[in-house]
Image (tube, rainbow, N blue to C red):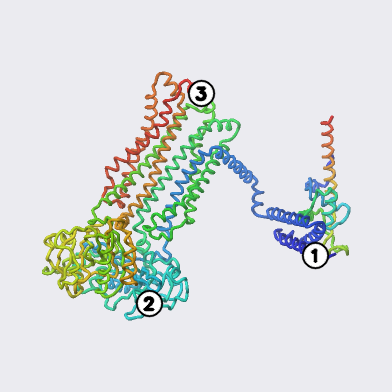
Amino acid sequence: MTESGINPRVTSLLPLKPTWFHIMLALSDGAQHGYAIRARAEERSGGKVKLWPATLYGSIHSLEEEGLIEALEGQDDPDDDARRRYYRLTPLGGEALRAEAARLEALVQAVRSASALKNA
Amino acid sequence: MTGQRPSTRRAEALFRASLRILPEPIRGLYEAEMRADFETLARDEAARSGARLWSATLRATLDVVKIGMVERGRRGPLTRWLTRWEGIREGMMDWFRELRMAGRSLARRPAFSGIAALTLGLGIGATVAIFAVVDSVLLRPLPFPESDRIVEVRHHAPGIGLDELNNSEGTVVFYQAQTDLFSVFGAFDAGNFNLAGQDEPVRVRAARFTPEIFDVLQTRPALGRPLTHADAAEGAPGVAILSHELWASSFGSDPGVLGQTIYLDDRPAEVVGIMPAGFVFPRPGNQVFLPLPISDDPQFGAFGMGGVGRLAPGMTLEMAAQRVSDLQARAAELDPEITLEALEGWGWAASVRTIKESLVGDSRPAIMIVLGTVSVLLLIALANVANLFLVRSDGRQREMAIRGALGAGSGRIARTYLAESALLGGMAGITGLALAGLGLEGIVALVGDELPRVQDVNMTAGGLGLTATLSLAAAMALGVLPMARRQGAFAETLRDGGRGSTHGAARHRVRHFLVTGQLALALVLLVGSGLLLRSFMALRATDVGFDGRDVVTVGLSFGEGEREAQAQFYRDVIEGTAALPGVTSVGASAALPLISSSSNGGSFHIEGEPEQEGDLPMVTLYKAFTPGYAETLGIELLAGRPHTWSDLSDDAQNVWVNREMADQFLGGVNEALGKRISVDGDSVIYFSEIVGVFETVKTNGIDNDDAPMTYFPLLNGEASRGPMEWMALTVEAPNGPTSVVPAIRELVRAADPRVPVTAVRTMDDIRSEATADTSVTLILLGIVSGMALLLGAIGLYGVISYTVSQRIQEIGVRMALGADRGQVQGMVLRQSVMVTAGGVILGLLGAFALSRVMATLLFGVSATDPVTFLTVPVVLALVSVLSAWLPARRASRVDPALALRAD
């Protein structure tokens, strides 16, 4: 894996905390509000990941502070509760998500090759 | 959307409440969203089932708590500090691990840990309990504002045998005028009254205060008003203030009692106030407070009241003592009949002490000796446990050596030892605290009556601090001890298998030293209790001048009244009692032997022997008594005739005196007969003829000198003397003295239902009480020194048996080479004799050095009493040899073949 060309700011964030990763992954399809993030994470993990409100918004707070996601102002879905805000990935957030995905992929490959050796 | 169900609302309320745990930025920014999300969540889950709703609510709420704590921790100062000093956290974790391991290691040897913790706990507990007594009784100030500025003035006239005198009206008024010395000065006295109005009349203890006392103490009634000068004026309507305790017990804490009238000895008094709970002055147990009048023409002579003052601003205790002392030269101004020469002859002096000192000063020596004793016990316990630790650390030498060889630094190994001793210290501290609590209860139960301020005794913060300090100090000492000898010993230990090295000799020396110390300290304590035991025996053996076997005393308080009426009442009761079955003899007297508080005293004159100018006045105690009194108590009539009821109706005035009176003033027992004396007649003199002389009876405790005594019949015409408000019936009943008491109660009720029966005691009880001070100290010291002896013996046993086990191989060799059992036993016993001899010598030196301290507590025995100083070492030596004999016997049974094979 080549690391050249990757933003050093991103490198310093890796590996991403699992909660962060799930939230960012949920936002990779487009802006969402908190409850939808929870629903998507749960769905994607086959019900294994449950982001309870405090964990979810605690992480959203950290992600906002790190500049990885941002809240969209004034974009309300008329069907939704007015208290809800929408969040989306920042460019930095997208970059970090991709870098983390690449890291995980490399990891999985390493594991696979190791088990291949073992099974041989 | 359907309406919310109540369960959903409750779930939301719970969640909402939990959000408060979150720190501000997160809560402020996202609370609305979190609540919106949770509402949706709750609705969805509730739609499926109630159980799912509550499971989700619980998990969401716990999640809030977790995040709240994590986020707060991340922002908190402790976390920042810990992150900065990650190393410290690591170190703490190491300690936790070490403590856990120490806990397991101690739990694996419950006998060792239990004995060590209990031994130390005993020492700590005893010390803390006695310290709590010292703190509560001796150190803590009395509960009055600036109580260290409240002082008591006392007078002394040793030249006429009156070492301790209180105050008179004259001196009180005199000190009240010295406003630069005392900002306020007041007087008090005490008495007993019959309080009527309840179902049965009760005897109450009363203190009388001049109004100034409330300012001296700066204490007001909790309800109502203090006493005023108007209350104390002559002819003023009676008023009374009740103690909080009497108010609660007899008046149901009813505030309406203010303004009500109570009857004290049939005299009405309006209740004007209730003192605060726990108010104690001048002594515990006063239930009623009455005004004490001071007449307009204050007399110098009658020293019956206590005097206390609050020091004026700027006046120190030392300055006040000097001022009061200087003022005594002016005492002659108080009474025209007193000359400076007379004052000089009396050795007249005055002294000042704080009221706390006056309350607790007398018990200080005994308390401090007991504190010293338990501290010594703590030292012995510590030495004992230290020895246990040494033995144990020897057993672990190989383990430690291996750990050292494997790279554990000395710090690491030190930590192992310290963790164990710290844990043990903690266990000992907790045990000690529990034992101290029990011990305090025991002390209060055992010596409550002899201990001033017993109501104040409790465990204080100081006591808790002392427990912690002692535990910590013990833990440090124990942990450091094995390490001190460990430096550089690892290699050696591994080489020689932990046996027989030069190092071993040093170890034995330490251990011997500790046991020698224990035995020496035990000897000091044993000598102390031996001396007290001898004192106690001397007190018991002292001839008190009467034989009170099978005699019960019953207090009757007729109260004030006409002397004739009083005499008639007592005579009726006595004659009624004499007729009761089982009663062989009966009499009465206004003061019982040995009880200090119940005799009057005064000066007297002998007819035909005019006093010279400047002569010291002659002083005698006096009291009223009845026929049968001397016979009941077995007081020997040395000369003259016994007292009979016909003496009451005779016109002649007769009195009886004791041998001390006859010897001191009247020229001897036989010469006293026929002489006429006048006792305490203020200005008019009424003489009575001495018609009999009794053997001297101890009046004021067993350990006080004999005092002159004059006995007056109940009625003696104008010469009648001695108050009769209260008299003690003395009843001899050989078949169980107390069995006649119910019948006597019946008799008294029939004679006068208003008269309460008080203080039923046998003369044996009274005798025991007179020796109570000594016996209490003796019991405490006896218990402690017994424990010390036991610990010393255990220590010696432990050391000798350990030495034997270490020398098994050597003993085997000796026996293989032909030593017989006797020689082996002798060898082992020699070791114990050496240690014991050292302990005895050191202990005797210590006991001699401390004998001066003991002297104040002793009676009839020298502080260097040879019997004690010879007996105690023998006892100690016997116990020592006995405790060494068991291991010696084991040594002599060693099988040489087995011993040589073993490693």
Mark 3 and mark 2: Cα distance apart in space = 92 Å
**Label 1 or label 2, whichever comes before in sequence order:** 1
The chain that hosts pointer 1 is B
x and y percentages locating residue B268 in the rendered image: 36, 78
Horizontally, is B692 left or right of B701 in the view? left
- How busy is the neighbourhood of tag 3: few (under 14 within 10 Å), some, or many (20 plus)? few
- How busy is the neighbourhood of tag 2: few (under 14 within 10 Å), some, or many (20 plus)? some
Of residues B318 and B562, the one drawn nearer to the viewer in this rendering: B562
Mark 1 and mark 3: Cα distance apart in space = 84 Å
Q: Secondary structure at mark 2?
A: strand
Q: Which residue is mark 3?
A: B902
Of residues B730 and B470, the one drawn nearer to the viewer in this rendering: B730
Nearer the camera: disc 3 or disc 2:
2
- In the depicted structure, whether residue B68 falls above or below residue B834: below
* Residue type marked 3: Ala
- Residue B655: name its quadrant: bottom left
Q: Is residue B875 visible?
A: yes
Q: Which residue is mark 2?
A: B269
* Residue type marked 2: Ala
x and y percentages locating residue B362 in the rendered image: 34, 58
Determine whether label 3 and label 2 are within 8 Å by CB. no
- In the depicted structure, whether residue B330 falls above or below residue B796: below
Q: Which residue is mark 1?
A: B4
The chain that hosts pointer 3 is B
Determine whether label 1 and label 3 are within 8 Å by CB. no
